[in-house]
Image: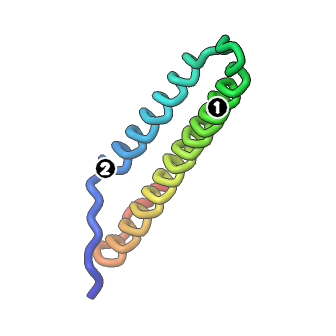
């Protein structure tokens, strides 16, 4: 017999909210990055480093958005399968989709 998987109803939404807060934090921080750096001979190097950090932060932000979307998709599928199984045992149960 397979082990039962239980997911509290609010868990997936809470996870999506946490991912969204992380993404918002990154986006807010990006707005505070300096437009230019005046560091004499090191300006070009520091600007290049800052550019790489900003590019990496944008990638993390995009990844958080993608993971959040996947959590939604997996959650909907989980509840649909749960409803199908419950329907097999107790009659028809409406699906989420």
- Quarter placement of the N terminus: bottom left
Q: Position of residue 70 (x, y in %)?
A: 52, 54
Determine whether 4 is above or below 2 in the image: above
As drawn, 68 above or below 61: below
Is residue 21 positioned above or below 95 on the image?
above
Picture residue at 42% right of the left edge, 43% below the top: 16
Q: Position of residue 40 (x, y in %)?
A: 69, 13
Q: Secondary structure at mark 2?
A: helix
Task: Give the residue at x 29% y 83%.
Answer: 2
Disc 1 from disc 2: Cα separation: 38 Å
Q: Is residue 40 left or right of residue 83?
A: right
Looking at the rendered structure, the secondary structure element under dot 1 is helix
Question: Camera-side residue: 81 or 15?
Answer: 15
Q: First in sequence, mark 1 or 2: give its number.
A: 2
Residue carrying label 1 = 49
Q: Give the farthest residue toward the bottom.
A: 1
Q: Are marks 1 and 2 in contact (CB under 8 Å)?
A: no
Q: Residue at x 58, y 19 (%)?
A: 33
Tell me: residue 8, above or below residue 26: below
Choose top left, top right, bottom left or bottom right for residue 94.
bottom left
Instruction: Spot the residue most to the front.
Output: 41
Report the disc number at residue 4.
none
Q: Residues within 10 Å of mark 1 (few under 14, many from 20)?
A: few
- Crowding around mark 2 (Cα neighbors within 10 Å: few <14, some 14 to 19, many 20+) is few
Q: Is residue 61 left or right of residue 52?
A: left
Where is residue 74 drawn, in percent x and y?
A: 47, 59
| Residue closer to the observer: 80 or 14 | 14
Residue linked to disc 2 = 11
Q: Residue 56 falls in which quadrant of the image? A: top right
> Looking at the image, which residue is at 42% across and 69% down?
81
């Amino acid at each position: 017999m397979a082990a039962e998987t239980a997911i509290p109803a609010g868990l997936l939404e809470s996870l999506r909210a946490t991912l969204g807060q992380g993404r918002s934090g990154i986006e807010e921080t990006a707005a505070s990055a300096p437009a230019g750096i005046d560091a004499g001979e090191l300006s070009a190097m520091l600007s290049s480093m800052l550019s790489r950090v900003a590019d990496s932060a944008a990638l993390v932000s995009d990844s958080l958005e993608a993971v959040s979307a996947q959590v939604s998709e997996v959650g909907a599928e989980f509840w649909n399968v749960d409803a199908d199984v419950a329907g097999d045992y107790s009659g028809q149960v409406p699906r989420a989709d």
